[in-house]
Amino acid sequence: MITLEKRPQPSKLWTAITPVLAVIATMIAGGFMFAILGKDPFEAIRTIFWDPLFNEQFAAFSRPQLLVKAAPLILIAIGLSVGFRAGVWNIGAEGQYIIGAICGAAVGLAFYPTESFFIFPLMVIAGALGGLAWAMIPGILKVKFHTNEILVSLLLVYVAEFILASMALGTLRNPEGNGFPGSRNLKEYPSAFNAELLPGSGAHWGVVAAIVAVIFAYVLFSKHMMGFHIRLAGQAPKAARFGGVEPARLILFCLGVSGMLAGMAGLFEVSGPAGQISIDFNVGYGFTAIIVAFLGRLNPFGILLAGLLMALTYIGGELASFMLGVPTAAIQAFQGMLLFFLLAVDVLTNYRIRFGKRGIA
Amino acid sequence: MVAATPILLAALGELVVEKSGVLNLGVEGMMITGAICGFAIAVETGSPVLGFIAAAIGGALLSLIFGILTQYLLSNQVATGLALTLFGLGLSSLIGQGYVGIRPPAVEKLNLGPLSDIPFFGPVLFNHDLMVYLTLALCVAIWAVLKYSRAGLILRAVGENHDAAHALGYKVIHVRLLAISFGGACAGLGGAYLSLIRVPQWTEGMTAGAGWIALAIVVFASWRPLRVLLGAYLFGGVTVLQLNLQAAGFSIPVEYLSMSPYLITIAVLVIMSAPRKGKKGRASLAAPACLGRAFHASQ
């Protein structure tokens, strides 16, 4: 008989090991999935996790892609981790990401075709404010009306997607685009283009912002009173209230930070790799970032690593679908599986497994 | 009524799950998995009935992943539910690859003879397929079981106070697993109703938030089955209305009409959760006391 015994404190050792364990378990289960699809599992796993980095033929192209894909994931996940630690569940990062991209791009396009150095910073600010405003909707509803922030933030994703469609087809449509949906391409507008900072590295301003966000989150959690309040509210809500933590301020702060970061991520994406507002420029980073946040144990540096790993599965997935004909949907299922395994092995950090008969209490 | 049925099914399943004290946010994932399982089996076998059965099984199996993770491995219910949704969306589009653009076998409408010929009420009430009426029956059955039967009492006891239920000798985890798989089966049926009857076609991500709306309707209904019925039909009415407005070519852009169901759901959530003078909101009073809390016998 196997029984679980609660640990007095979460084990530090297991906190570090479990993500690795989960990744390995996912690789094994993913291998089975690929085998069922009729692909060689070892080759598929190698194509996803190894080839993008070390294969001579592809690495030159895919290594810079790693940073391009990891930056938005890390930015959003850092924001989410702030909320998740406090027990504030912002699931609508995808919506904040879209709105941030729209607001930022709209500001940029408003200046077209003037060239100036302050346009891009303005766009970044607009993107952040857009994401912030979108995240404030569930925040304020939660504070004023005790509405469940999970449902509201999620439903707002669908609303944001419709706004995006209406923008791409209407307000922001490229006047010289011959009636095709989508805005002007920001890549052809130097002041608004989020260019690579070092040629061939893939590092655009979003990467810089992601690194800054990681450091900011680290300082917040380890040195700042607000970070302590956040952790306190998450682990012991009652103690937090007696300790003088205002729940309303905390909720708004958590949602605000994650909304701002998601909005910025959206702007960096739309002004750089995506290039324009189109009906479906968003690819679900807002949802994948949830996995990244958990995989990184809600720890800033953990999220940095997790973001890179998740970006690898995106690139490797593309490569695998191109080389082996593995459907791209398989990668999505693969990522979902990772989160399952992660949550499953989590039991080891909080509980000790005892073998043998249960004693009489 | 056709627009409301999938949401009603999913919401009823989730109601039972939440009554047992478990918050499963994976409704969307289970719905879409049910949609594709039902669709695939119905196309392969040519029988919609088998399709619906397969959808229920598919949804229940997926929900059991959630059940094992949250009940035996004590994982966080919110996170696990989200994982279920993400995984379900991926899995369904994986299975659904070969099925895009195919028409499923048609489902016969139930022939109620002269009843369907009554003007107005005939087409509205008596001109549907069997699933609509089965769903209505299910709704009443759930209400009766929860209110009058011993099984319903045990389920509610587990949801309100799992420690007391455990002390009385009820198997908390077993009850919850049963409730979770029932919820999964219902969500699967709801999804299959979308892909087999309502649309009827398979497209990726076709549930488009219906699962989340079902979750919201459970809150709206203050965890009461008959109010779930009301909520789902109100919502179905709004959906049909905005579709008709789109078709009628009103001057409001299509995108704004399409987002209206989501906005209305949010508005309803706000109204239901808003605190009254000096009292807690209606929603938080009616919620099962142990909702979302993990149960471990040692605690």
Image (tube, rainbow, N blue to C red):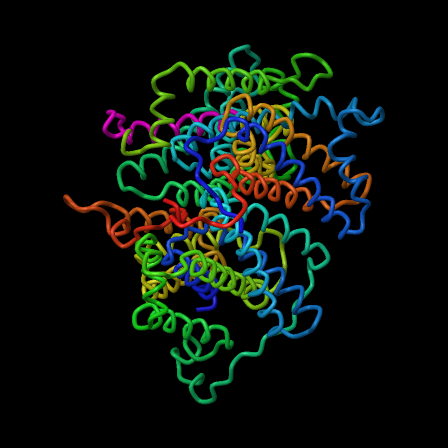
Of the 4 image quadrants, the one containing the N terminus of chain B is: bottom left
Residue B229 at x, y = what percent? Answer: 36, 66
| Helix, strand or loop: magenta stretch | helix
Farthest right residue? A57
Q: Please tell me whether residue A150 is drawn above or below residue A184 in the rendered image.
A: below
Residue A32 in the magenta stretch? The answer is no
Q: Which residues are magenta?
A: A240-264
Q: Please tell me whether residue A197 is drawn above or below residue A178 in the rendered image.
A: above
Q: Residue at x 79, y 24 (%)?
A: A54
Residue A211 at x, y = what percent? Answer: 55, 17
Residue B2 at x, y = what percent? Answer: 47, 68
Farthest bottom residue? B114
Q: B218 or A273: nearer the eye?
A: B218
Farthest left residue? B278
Left or right: residue A333 compared with residue B158: right
Q: Residue at x 67, y 56 (%)?
A: B96
